[in-house]
Structure formats: structure tokens, C-alpha cells
Image (cartoon, rainbow, N blue to C red):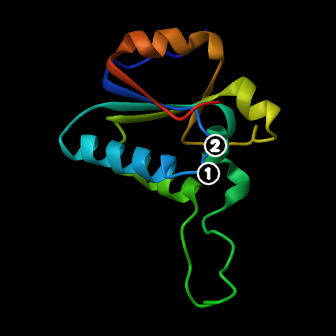
Amino acid sequence: MARPIPATDVLLNLFGAPHQSDLVTSALRLATALLDRGARVQIWTCGDATRLTSAALGDTKPRDLTDLERRHPSTALIVRDLLADHPDRLYWYVCRFCADDRGAADQIPQVSKRSPFLFAEHVKAADKSLVMGVC
């Protein structure tokens, strides 16, 4: 049986390829701003956006050969930290079919993989829903 979906103020649906535009930055900034105002937020990733929380990403991005000393966090680490900072107000979901299809089945443990057939239930559980990107 599927886990219950908590009621939230906003559902952010990330459907686009994560690194072709400012989609990820915009979504993370919007989620952070909502959380800072006390909102309860759920994020559903579908398509290539399921790779944002792939366990294979590790904690840092590959090193920049022009600046070897500088380290940049991976999106998986950013999401993990955000979830740790807001354990009862932020929920991150990954479409199981999309993740499996893209070789991203192994996700960080803090996110939940869900069947796409449950997506409508997530929409119902949120007061507002915003779609960001396209598949």
C-alpha cells in the first residue's frame, strides 16, 4: 500500500531536462522561498529531472579543471540538505517509471519513488500546483 501523501500548500512539478535552462535553480529558489515563509512543499520530478537526486551524483560535481581547488555541491547534496533543514515541510518525490527508464533507479534515500499513477493524488493533496518545464 502506498504511503499517505501529506497535505501541502504547493506542489512543484519538475518535468524538464534539468540542465538545459535555469529550471533547477528556479525551482530550488522558489521552494526555498516558500519554505522560508512557512509553506509546506512537495516536489515531483518526472522525465530527466529524476536524475537530480540520483545517488550516483555523490556530494560534489566533477572538478572544474580551470579551478581545481573549488568544490561545488551536487544537486543530490543540495536536495538532501534542503530536506534535512525542513523535514516536516518538504517532500521530494521521483517518478519511478521515469527514473528506471533513465538509469536513475538508485536515488538518495531521502526521496520517495512513486508510481506515476499516484500523481493525481499528489495534485489533490496540494492547494496549488505549478508545472516547471516540459518532458
The residue shown at (37%, 41%) is 87
The residue identified by callout 1 is: 20
- Residue 2 visible from this viewpoint: no
The quadrant of the picture occupied by the N terminus is top right
- Residue 63 visible from this viewpoint: yes
Q: Amino acid at mark 1?
A: Gln
Q: Quadrant of residue 15?
A: top right
Q: Amino acid at mark 2?
A: Ala
| Residue contact at pointers 1 and 2, CB within 8 angstroms | yes
Residue 20 lies, with reference to residue 96, above or below; the image says below
Residue 5 lies, with reference to residue 41, above or below; the image says above
Q: Residue 8: give its label.
A: none
Secondary structure type for disc 2: loop
The residue shown at (54%, 58%) is 77
Label 2 neighbour load within 10 Å: few <14, some 14-19, many 20+: some
The residue shown at (74%, 42%) is 106
Toward the left, the furthest residue is 37
Secondary structure type for disc 1: loop
Residue 132 lies, with reference to residue 30, above or below; the image says above
Q: CA distance from mark 1 to mark 2?
A: 6 Å
Q: Quadrant of residue 93?
A: top right
Q: Nearer the viewer, residue 113 or 129?
A: 129
Task: Answer left or right for 92 relative to 35.
Answer: right
Q: Nearer the viewer, residue 13 or 1?
A: 13
Residue 115 position, x and y percent, is: 66, 17
Q: Residue 17: give its label.
A: 2
Task: Answer left or right for 86 relative to 111.
Answer: left
Residue 6 position, x and y percent, is: 38, 20
Residue 68 lies, with reference to residue 51, above or below; the image says below
Q: How many marks?
A: 2
